Image (cartoon, rainbow, N blue to C red):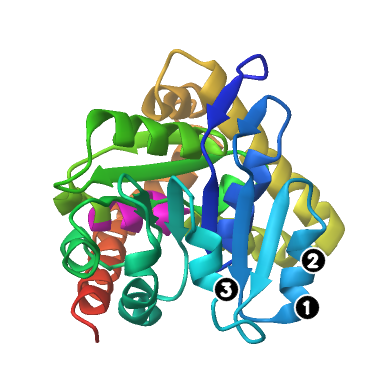
Amino acid sequence: MSAEATVRLPAIAFLGAGSMARAILTGLLQPGIEVDGGIRATNRGAEKAAELAELPGVAAFATETDAAANRTAVAGAKIVVVAVKPAMVPALLEEIADALVPGTIVVSVAAGVTVATFESLLPASVAVIRAMPNTPAVVGRAVTGISAGTRASDADLALAVALFETVGEVLVVPEDQIDALSTISGSGPAYVFYLIEQLTATAVGKGFTPGQAAVMVEGTFRGASELLAASDDGPGELRRRVTSPNGTTERAVALLESASLKQIFDRATDAALARARELAAGA
């Protein structure tokens, strides 16, 4: 979302206020975002609910002290974001189903839970959108995949896109691609952090202090990402510009290529996809 943009959204309820829900909520509190009817949020613990209630425009309820907390939160909300653990989703949907007003858009950020599962447990008058944001939402740099359910209109989808654009970029994809997307952008930050972690350890092994290693590695990743974002060229071309023929970088890249990184990423993302399907099956 650009700094100049003004976004108006209807009343929103977050059921479950873990790290992802809080990141999205933080996006909604930016200047230029107006939520008509306010934001509601539920959390199991009273202490965390109290912390949420201190945020401007947020009403929070604790399920451990208020059995009707989730139903209270969704009453009159146009958008309901389901952000509980996947195993908790069916019971939650059964709990709130008759408290949702016709035309509500229920947005799932629960990994592996299908649109069909949501639609089977919710009234026909309720639309379902499945979303897969990633953790850079915390700093407004998320990549979120969104899939519309069978009852969702173009207007419903547009509202969901507007919601997630408050924390980054949005890709609308068919649901049969959402789990694959999660193995790239959803899990992707972990892959990047792992590479940074390992390269930092290598720098320390070459005699640099941990502080020096962090400056070199984190600064290089940040700078390379910003260079890529600012360039009209893709990563392959930018890599070639750094790789002088018969130079030191060429020697290093040749060794990386011999390790078959593409195949390693194929296998890693395939493993993540298999786990997503296990979650969808209730494993």
Marks counted in the figure total 3
Q: Position of residue 164 (x, y in %)?
A: 48, 39
**Nearer the observer, disc 1 or disc 3?**
3
Q: Secondary structure at mark 2?
A: helix
The residue shown at (79%, 70%) is 50
Residue beneath disc 2: 51
Q: Quadrant of residue 146?
A: top left
Mark 2 and 1 residues: CB-CB less than 8 Å, in contact? Answer: yes
Q: Secondary structure at mark 3?
A: helix
For the magenta stretch, what is the residue range?
179-188
Q: Secondary structure at mark 1?
A: helix
Q: Position of residue 15 (x, y in %)?
A: 51, 65
Q: Report the amino acid beneath label 2.
A: Glu
**Residue 69: assigned label:** 3
Q: Is residue 147 above or below residue 229?
A: below
Q: Is residue 81 above or below residue 140?
A: below
Judge from the rendering whether residue 99 lies leftward or rightward of residue 67; answer left or right: left
Q: Nearer the viewer, residue 43 or 263?
A: 43
Answer with mark 3 or mark 2, whichever residue precedes in sequence.
2
Q: CA distance from mark 2 to mark 1?
A: 6 Å
Q: Can residue 208 be seen at all in this image of the molecule?
A: no
- Disc 3: CA contacts within 10 A as few (<14), some (14-19) or many (>=20): many
Q: Report the amino acid beneath label 1.
A: Glu
Answer with mark 1 or mark 3, whichever residue precedes in sequence.
1
